[in-house]
């Protein structure tokens, strides 16, 4: 598929630039970090739905879903969506999974309806995980759904339409690292940039993110893998500014840049959450069992009381809970997940949860010190 440079659409915001403090410890970032200046009123308006939502659904679906955490009859340790890395599957061999990717039983209506009945107010799905496979027909790569037997269907569009029907906000996940793209080498937690090719990937990533905004107009963009050494604070700020220009209303998590020092638009916690109230918008994301992606031998399901307790604790401290489901290779979600959602909703109805909304009176920015965290369930490689 030919590469075409995606034109940035949308009117430019009439915002001036402000200079923030230089961010220390960011290799390769010799520029001062610059953020578009924004009025707190505009920020508050776009964050309003998120502040009130309190509960959402995370969906992990990719080529890895076919494998169920098993390669060459061996179950991978850790998260199933990391199987290419954990099992050291060469790119050329892993790419063959394109030929069998066909989640034909995926049912957006059933999934979104279940989310709504569970009390969830938004949904986020992986568009490109670390494996690099794109769940939409992208004009910037052939490593996408259009190159699979599933071509002709668009899961992102199906979910987007179902969310509109049921009144949920629609969000898209995008990984910064990419084990397939030729500008990056390695299959681990840290990829390396091939000499002289960083800008090639940065452009590819920006173009894809803007393509997603243009095609689906999401309410949220959820980034991951900011831990890559080659990805600098300045890189993240540049991408954030491009997103903000393309869409004044989409909200973005802090992993778009370096999470330790960036707090726009909201702070993301993974398999853990703050031990006390945090004076910014934030979210804690959790699995229902042990893996984000479907793992056939993972039966360590949380019970509904555990999920309810997490939701209650997070909500009372001002945060949102993003709870994950992982469809299998056929596109189906395990019945245990639906049962947990239903039972948790019953507990919520029996004992309503007090929801606290953070009072954010100053614009978030760069270099914020975060309080101690708790509930670290699993030492992990990332979502």
Image (cartoon, rainbow, N blue to C red):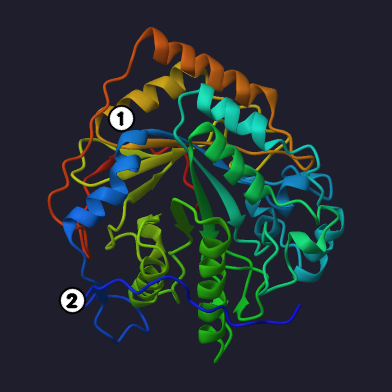
Q: Mark 2 or mark 1: which is in front?
A: 2
**Displayed quadrant of residue 253:** bottom left
With 63 as the anchor, is 176 left or right in this view? left
Viewer-side residue, 254 vs 184: 254
Which residue appears at 61% of the width and 81% of the height? 183
Q: How crowded is mark 2: few (under 14 residues within 10 Å), some or many (20 or more)?
A: few
Q: Position of residue 309 (x, y in %)?
A: 38, 21
Q: Mark 1 points at which residue?
A: 315
- Give the vertical position of 65 relative to 225 (above or below): above
- The answer to whether 117 is drawn above or below residue 6 in the figure is above
27 displayed left or right of 134: left
| Label ID, residue 18 | 2
The kind of secondary structure element at disc 2 is strand
Q: In this view, does 47 lie above or below 248?
A: above
Q: Residues within 10 Å of mark 1 (few under 14, many from 20)?
A: many
> Helix or strand or loop: what does disc 1 sit on?
helix
Q: Report how far apart the C-alphas of labels 2 and 1 lie in the structure.
A: 33 Å
Residue 55: name its quadrant: top left
Residue 69 in the image: x percent, y percent?
A: 72, 44
Residue located farthest toward the front when viewing the structure as drawn: 11
* Nearest the eye: 183 or 215: 215
The label on residue 376 is none
Residue 189 appearing in the image: no
Residue 358 appearing in the image: yes
Question: Going from the N terminus, do you reach mark 2 or mark 1 first?
Answer: 2
The residue nearer to you, when weighing 229 against 111, is: 111
Residue at (68, 48) in percent of width and height: 155
Please state the horizontal and vertical placement of residue 9, each as a whole percent of the image: 47, 73
């Amino acid at each position: 598929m030919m590469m075409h440079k995606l034109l940035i659409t949308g009117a430019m915001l009439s915002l001036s630039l402000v200079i923030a403090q230089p961010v220390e410890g960011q290799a390769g970032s010799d520029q001062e970090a610059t953020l578009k200046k924004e009025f707190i009123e505009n920020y508050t308006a776009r964050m309003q739905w998120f502040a009130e939502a309190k509960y959402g659904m995370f969906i992990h679906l990719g080529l890895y879903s076919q494998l169920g955490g098993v390669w060459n009859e061996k179950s991978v340790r850790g998260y199933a969506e990391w199987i290419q890395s954990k099992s050291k599957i060469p790119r050329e061999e892993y790419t063959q999974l394109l030929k069998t990717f066909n989640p034909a039983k995926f049912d957006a209506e059933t999934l979104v309806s279940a989310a709504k009945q569970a009390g969830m107010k938004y949904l986020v799905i992986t568009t490109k995980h670390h494996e690099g496979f794109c769940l939409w027909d992208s004009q910037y790569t052939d490593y996408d759904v259009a190159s699979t037997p599933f071509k002709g269907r668009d899961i992102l569009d199906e979910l987007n339409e179902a969310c509109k029907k049921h009144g949920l906000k629609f969000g898209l996940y995008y990984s910064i690292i990419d084990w397939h793209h030729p500008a990056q080498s390695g299959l681990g937690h840290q990829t390396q940039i091939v000499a002289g090719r960083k800008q090639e990937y940065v452009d590819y990533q920006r173009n894809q993110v803007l393509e997603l905004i243009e095609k689906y107009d999401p309410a949220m963009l959820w980034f991951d893998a900011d831990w890559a050494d080659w990805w600098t604070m300045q890189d993240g700020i540049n991408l954030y500014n491009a997103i903000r220009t393309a869409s004044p209303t989409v909200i973005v998590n802090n992993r778009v840049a370096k999470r330790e020092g960036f707090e726009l638009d909201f702070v993301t916690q993974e398999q853990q959450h703050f031990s006390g109230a945090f004076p910014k918008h934030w979210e804690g994301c959790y699995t229902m069992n042990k893996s984000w992606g479907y793992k056939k031998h993972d039966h360590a399901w949380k019970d509904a009381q555990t999920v309810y307790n997490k939701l209650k604790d997070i909500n009372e401290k001002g945060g949102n809970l993003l709870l994950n489901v992982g469809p299998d290779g056929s596109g189906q979600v395990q019945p245990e997940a639906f049962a947990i959602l239903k039972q948790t909703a019953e507990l919520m109805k029996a004992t309503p949860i007090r929801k606290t909304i953070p009072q954010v009176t100053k614009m978030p920015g760069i270099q914020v010190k975060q309080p101690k965290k708790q509930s670290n369930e699993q030492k992990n490689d990332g979502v």
